[in-house]
Amino acid sequence: MTGELRPSTRTRVALPARTVESRLIVVARAQRAEDYEPVLDVLIDAGIRSIELTLTTPGTFDRLPQLLARYDGAADLGVGTVTNSEDLARAVDAGARYLVTPITSTSFVQQATDAGVPIVPGGLTPTELFASWSAGASAVKVFPAGQVGPSYLKDLRGPFPDIVAVPSGGVDLAGAEAWLAAGAVAVSVGGPLLGDAFGGGDLGALRDRAEAFVAVCAR
């Protein structure tokens, strides 16, 4: 059939074991890269084991080697909001443990897979998600997850029983539990966990929120 999507014969690069075991990715979107450490210190001390550093945070690439040296023994640091092949290559060269993009791009999947780095491309429709999965993505990012809900993953599993999904966007504490129960390999969480931490908020309260998410994802 013309235009039919066929499963890729390309070897799929697995997500880092530590990320899969924790079932939780925290999306760290700061105003500047210099603000990362105080917040990441709290997150990792609270049990967070996978953090996505976003390229919408100025200076992320410059800061990444320092952050990897500081945290690599304790957490997987990925690079997210990748929207062009040049940034993808730069993230690979910088040592990102995985890559996340908000878009569906089979060329990004091929580029990352050829480099041996896990990639999680975003999508919402069945066609978008299956295109990335069949191209060899490590997992697919259901985004924005808040527009559909956990039952959507159960529906997707009908035609795509093997698809590995990570919901992202508007996932709160109750949502994390529900998405994981629906079969998500992990949940991607930003604002509901971080709150105002990057804006000078209470880091003690951040620790409490992080510990609550860790506990839910460990069930």
Image (cartoon, rainbow, N blue to C red):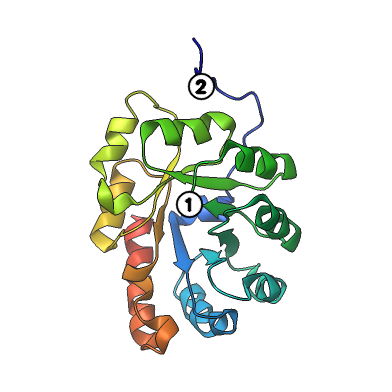
Q: How many marks?
A: 2
Q: Is residue 110 left or right of residue 131?
A: right
In this picture, is 11 found above or below 80? above
Q: Residue at x 35, y 52 (%)?
A: 144
Q: Position of residue 26 (x, y in %)?
A: 45, 65
Q: Residue at x 64, y 57 (%)?
A: 97
CA neighbours of label 1 inside 10 A, class few (<14), some (14 to 19), many (20+) = many
Return the residue found at the far top: 1
Between 115 and 38, the one lying in front of the other is 115
Q: Does residue 13 appear in this view? A: no
N-terminal of the pair, mark 1 or mark 2, is 2
**Quadrant in which residue 125 is drawn:** top left
In this picture, is 200 found above or below 10? below
Q: Label 1 amino acid?
A: Pro
Q: Which residue is mark 2?
A: 5
Q: Label 2 amino acid?
A: Leu
Q: Residue at x 37, y 42 (%)?
A: 124
Q: Is residue 28 left or right of residue 192?
A: right
Q: Secondary structure at mark 1?
A: loop
Q: Secondary structure at mark 2?
A: loop
- Identify the mark at residue 12; answer none if there is no mark: none
- Identify the mark at residue 102; answer none if there is no mark: 1
What is the C-alpha distance between the residues marked 1 and 2?
21 Å
**Quadrant in which residue 116 is drawn:** top right
Q: Position of residue 164 (x, y in %)?
A: 45, 38
Q: Is residue 179 left or right of residue 129?
A: left
Whether label 1 touches label 2, CB < 8 Å: no
In the rendered image, the quadrant that contains the C terminus is bottom left
